[in-house]
Structures are given as C-alpha cells and as structure tokens.
C-alpha cells in the first residue's frame, strides 16, 4: 500500500437520483491520470498517474505546450497565467 499512498483515493463514481427522491452514491478507488499517444508513432499509449487533479492538469498543459501549442499566442498567454 505504501507505493500507492497519496495516489489512490476513494471518489464518487456514480450518483443515482431515484424518482422517490432518494439518492444513491457509489464510491470507488480512483487515480488522476494523463494519457497521450506515444511519440514513436507505433500506436503506443503512455499513461501517467498523479496525486492530485491540479498536478494532472498542469502536466497536461505542459505536454500540450511541448506538442506545439506554444506556437499559439492565446494558448501561451493562458499557460503562463496558469489557466
């Protein structure tokens, strides 16, 4: 369990709203991930796991900039503003 500490969390995976007004919520273990088609061109799928949503979003934004979005002035502006 030490290897997954801080990565795997119990999160709401389903919320059912019944006609009688009751609500049924299910929680399951989950992680924040970022998936990207590998650079090799062989159809490889790279998947990274992050401790927090913020870390996954930042990694995704950085990857987008590295993959060419840095050529778009608006994207660069938003990235630098951490938006």
Image: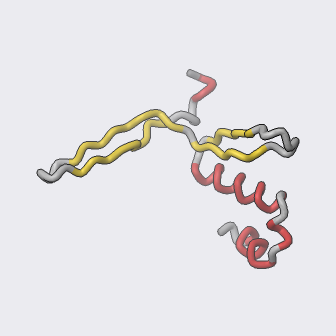
Quadrant the N terminus occupies: top right
Residue in the image at 80% along x and 66% along y = 69
Give the percent coordinates (x, y) of residue 43: 78, 40
The C terminus is located in which quarter? bottom right
In the figure, is residue 51 to the left or right of 43?
left
Examine the rendered structure and indicate whether residue 44 appears above or below residue 53.
above
Q: In which quarter of the view is residue 73 placed?
A: bottom right
Question: Taking 27 as reference, is 57 left or right?
Answer: right
In x, y percent, where is residue 19?
15, 53
Residue shown at the point (77%, 55%) measured from the top left: 63
In-image side of 11 versus 1 (left or right): left
Could you tell whether 18 is left or right of 50 in the image?
left
Task: State which quadrant residue 78 falls in.
Answer: bottom right
Residue 46 x/y as whole percent? 74, 39
Q: Position of residue 41 (x, y in %)?
A: 85, 44
Along the line of sight, the residue nearer the viewer: 29 or 41: 41
Kindly give the residue lying farthest to the front in the view shown. 42
Q: How many marks?
A: 0
Q: Is residue 35 above or below residue 57?
A: above
Which residue is outermost to the left? 20
Coloring scheme used: secondary structure
């Amino acid at each position: 369990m030490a290897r997954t500490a801080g990565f795997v969390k119990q999160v709401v995976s389903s919320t059912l709203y019944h006609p009688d007004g009751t609500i049924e919520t299910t929680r399951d273990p989950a992680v924040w991930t970022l998936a990207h088609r590998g650079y090799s061109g062989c159809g490889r799928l790279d998947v990274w796991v992050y401790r927090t949503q913020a870390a996954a979003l930042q990694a995704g934004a950085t990857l987008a900039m590295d993959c060419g979005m840095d050529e778009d002035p608006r994207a660069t502006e938003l990235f630098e503003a951490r938006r």
